[in-house]
């Protein structure tokens, strides 16, 4: 009897332990499911959309270029006998840079001068004879035509002599010299001789968006700065606004800068144009952080959080104000957008907002 009692007690204890273990297992599985669900959420940072009072001034970056730039090439063939400038020299329009051998041209010019003198003497003689009836009107006219033709040949010969002196077509600085004394020049193909750059003024080409270009006009004054001289400002004005957008849907704007007397600015330096709004009052603008965009601003896509779920949303963006972008459509004040963690998100993903 006692043996049966012991067996019953043992069975009861085993059953109790089984019940406890089963209950703990169910509880552990539930807790594991909660943890798994929590771990499946993507950690993100967010910001709330709001309307702010912002200045409509904006900036655009570019690289300074020379006001004029020319690769000066030979227009006639010949051997270089003199070079009168070196790299770094400042030259003026019409200044002689080099001389080529002009033996043939000089001979032709001397012959043309002699022919002209003969034609002039003949015309003077015929003119005197015509007054006394010694020659006819037709003979006098023929002498006059001969004089005109001789004068034309002399002028052409003198131009050829002048062509032996290679003169600067623009003012500027000799940036590169490609020839030496003794070099043989050809006109077909034309031999490059000098690179001349005019940096008395500089150009800064920048690109702006369609919303920004509508406020710009040629002649508008622009402040320009350079990262090399952070404490200096240079005066510029808009000289060109593209009538057509480029492949990126941006518009090219050219700003002309009067270089400072010391020539601090150099072509090739990095520059920034500061475009000021005509309206000095701040405007109420709904903005979204620039970092909220998936990819680039031009993609016009952001993740909006609703009920801890990320929804990929298409918006219409406008002007860019540094790290903020104008929202024209697709978002309202109070909407919550993801600003960090987008790379791990897909449309409809669960999120956990972290501070």
Image (spheres, helix red, strand yellow):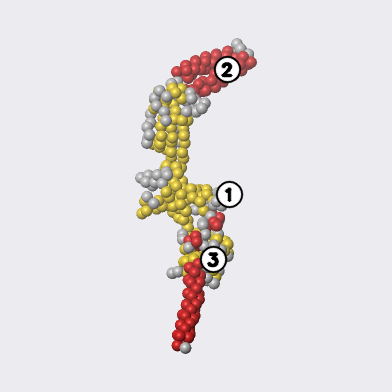
For numbered disc 1, what is the local secondary structure? loop
Judging from the image, what secondary structure is the residue with disc 2 in?
helix
Q: Position of residue 180 (x, y in %)?
A: 39, 27
Vertical comparison of 337 with 18: above or below = above
Judge by depth and name the residue closer to the eye, 40 or 309: 40
Badge nearest the viewer, 1 or 2: 1
Q: Which residue is mark 3?
A: 349
- Cα distance in 3D space between marks 3 and 1: 41 Å
The label on residue 244 is 1
Extreme residue in the bottom direction = 1
Identify residue for label 2. 146
Give the crowd class for mark 1: few <14, some 14-19, many >=20 residues within 10 Å: few
Residue in the foreground of this view, choosing between 305 and 165:
305
In the image, what residue occupies the spot 48% across and 25% down?
A: 186
- Pick the front one: 121 or 341: 341
Identify which residue, 290 or 227, lies in the foreground: 290
Q: Is residue 174 above or below residue 134?
A: below
Q: Is residue 335 visible?
A: no
């Amino acid at each position: 009897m006692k043996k049966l009692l012991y067996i019953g007690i043992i069975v009861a204890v085993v059953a109790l332990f089984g019940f406890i273990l089963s209950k703990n297992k169910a509880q552990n599985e539930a807790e594991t499911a909660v943890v798994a669900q929590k771990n499946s959420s993507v950690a993100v940072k967010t910001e709330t959309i709001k309307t702010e009072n912002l200045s409509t001034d904006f900036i655009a970056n570019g690289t300074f270029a020379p006001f004029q730039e020319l690769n000066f090439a030979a227009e006639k063939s010949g051997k270089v006998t003199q070079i009168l400038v070196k790299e770094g020299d400042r030259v003026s329009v019409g200044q002689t840079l080099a001389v080529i051998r002009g033996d043939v041209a000089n001979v032709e010019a001397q012959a043309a001068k002699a022919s002209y003198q003969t034609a002039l003497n003949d015309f003077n003689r015929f003119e005197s004879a015509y007054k006394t009836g010694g020659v006819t009107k037709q003979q006098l006219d023929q002498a006059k035509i001969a004089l005109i033709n001789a004068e034309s040949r002399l002028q052409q010969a003198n131009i050829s002599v002048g062509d032996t002196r290679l003169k600067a077509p623009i003012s500027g600085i000799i940036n590169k010299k490609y020839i030496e004394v003794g070099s043989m020049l050809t006109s077909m193909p034309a031999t490059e001789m000098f690179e001349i750059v005019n940096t008395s003024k500089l150009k800064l080409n920048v690109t702006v968006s369609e919303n920004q270009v509508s406020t710009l006009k040629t002649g508008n004054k622009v402040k320009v700065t350079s990262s090399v001289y952070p404490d200096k400002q240079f005066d510029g004005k808009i000289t060109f606004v593209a009538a057509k957008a480029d492949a990126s849907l941006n518009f090219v704007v050219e700003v002309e800068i009067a270089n400072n007397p010391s020539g601090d600015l150099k072509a090739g330096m990095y520059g920034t144009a500061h475009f000021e709004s005509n309206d000095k009052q701040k405007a109420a603008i709904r903005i979204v952080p620039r970092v909220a965009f998936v990819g680039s601003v031009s993609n016009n896509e952001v993740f909006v959080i609703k009920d801890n779920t990320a929804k990929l949303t298409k918006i219409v963006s406008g002007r860019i104000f540094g790290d903020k972008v104008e929202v024209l459509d697709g978002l309202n004040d109070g909407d919550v957008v993801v600003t960090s963690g987008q790379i791990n998100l897909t449309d409809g993903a669960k999120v956990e907002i972290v501070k």
